[in-house]
Image (spheres, helix red, strand yellow):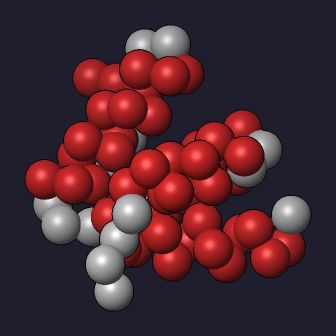
Amino acid sequence: MSLNRKKLLYAFVALPYHTRLSIMEQLKLIDEDNRGLPDNERFASCFDRAEKQNRLNDVWDLVESRQATS
């Protein structure tokens, strides 16, 4: 699958806050360094980490599954 990062970001931001946080925690993309950051910076850091770890497809899969239940 060719992942469209912009589409992923829009879909992610459209989810409720607790769902976004749950996805990032489930994928272990939040660490102590970014827990104290403002939300937008925290999630940007998580996306950067996901990209570096080649896990954006994992984020996409969880975002899609949560969209269906939101």
Observer able to see residue 18: no
Q: Quadrant of the N terminus?
A: bottom left
Observer able to see residue 34: yes
Farthest residue in the bottom direction?
A: 1
Quadrant assignment, res 57: bottom left
Quadrant assignment, res 39: top right
Q: Is residue 57 left or right of residue 20?
A: left
Name the residue nearer the viewer: 65 or 29.
65
Picture layout, residue 16 above or below residue 28:
above
Picture layout, residue 6 above or below residue 59:
above
Q: Position of residue 2 (x, y in %)?
A: 31, 78
Residue at 13% in and 53% down: 52
Q: Position of residue 56 (x, y in %)?
A: 33, 64
Name the residue nearer the viewer: 33 or 64.
64
Q: Is residue 27 left or right of residue 10?
A: left
Name the residue nearer the viewer: 1 or 32.
1
Q: Is residue 64 left or right of residue 31?
A: right
Farthest residue in the right direction?
A: 70
Quadrant assignment, res 28: bottom left
Residue at 35% in and 71% down: 3
The total number of labels drawn is 0
Residue at 27% in and 54% down: 50
Residue at 86% in and 64% down: 70
Picture layout, residue 70 above or below residue 33:
below
